[in-house]
Image: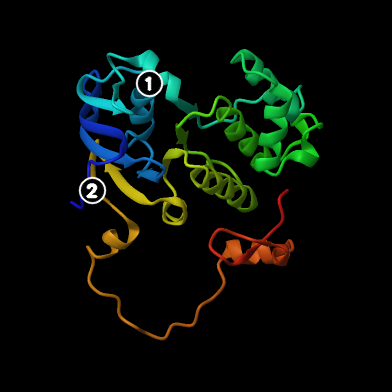
Amino acid sequence: MVTQSIAGQAIRVRGLEKSYGKLEVLRGVDFDVARGNIFALLGSNGAGKTTTVRILATLLKADAGTATVHDCDVATQPAKVRESISLTGQFAAVDEILSGWENLVLVARLRHLKDPGAIADDLLRRFSLTDAGSRKVSTYSGGMRRRLDIAMSLIGNPSVIFLDEPTAGLDPEARIEVWHAVKELAGHGTTVLLTTQYLDEAEQLADRIAILHQGRIIVNGTLAELKQLFPPAKVEYVEKQPTLEEIFLSVIGGSDKSDVTGTTTGGQG
């Protein structure tokens, strides 16, 4: 298994175990997340990704093992941990009756922050939602809702954010919108732990990738390190046909916007 240095870690997990009756969900999970990095926890449905996130977010107690966020133990110092984290679940937690701006102002007021209007304006700008800020969220696309949800989770400037399956159920355009939002988070120094079952998502976003399988981390490293686990690539001529996603984005006007890979994709929607 590829390992990483323990210096400068925002999150440390050692020997994490969790069972529900006879079902062993986590069976000794170990990993570190460096400060300011995007860390992808990759695995199929039922692999234990959400359980891991819920333990780290102090919403669930582990049966064994330890986990710390900025050196604060999630089991014995939950209040301290909550001061520095934010969690965005699998479904957007936004109020559809309110506008995007009103959603952000509401959360800022609940956190007793000064000048909630200015905070809302800044986050709308950061996530390219200014033009839609006055509209009811019920009129937003899936990608816009998800970006607003992530923006809401940043109120209070948490240093660590957990994104649990952030693009589940989204169309190709919306997924790319969310990818840009996640890159924006890391660009501002936020540590991101991302769970996903999409291989391309982990490949595009993560500084490090850990594969969770049957309750254990079976590999952990950068994309380059993971590629070294396999035989060297052979150079062969293969006629490349466009993927369905590329066709879809091209048909709807893919020349208007660049995606995170550097190719052209569709507009925001």
Identify the mark at residue 4; answer none if there is no mark: 2
Quadrant hosting residue 229? bottom left
Q: Residues within 10 Å of mark 2 (few under 14, many from 20)?
A: some
**How many marks overall?**
2
The location of residue 7, given as percent across then percent down, is: 25, 41
Observer-nearest residue: 153 or 125?
125
The location of residue 39, given as percent across then percent down, is: 38, 44
Q: Residues within 10 Å of mark 1 (few under 14, many from 20)?
A: many
Coloring scheme of the render? rainbow
- Say which element carries label 1: helix
Which residue is depicted at the point 55% across and 49% down?
179
Which residue is depicted at the point 33% across and 29% down?
70
Amino acid type, label 1? Val
The location of residue 192, given as percent across then percent down, is: 44, 39
- Say which element carries label 2: loop
Name the residue carrying label 1: 81
Q: Is residue 86 above or below residue 106?
A: below
Amino acid type, label 2? Gln
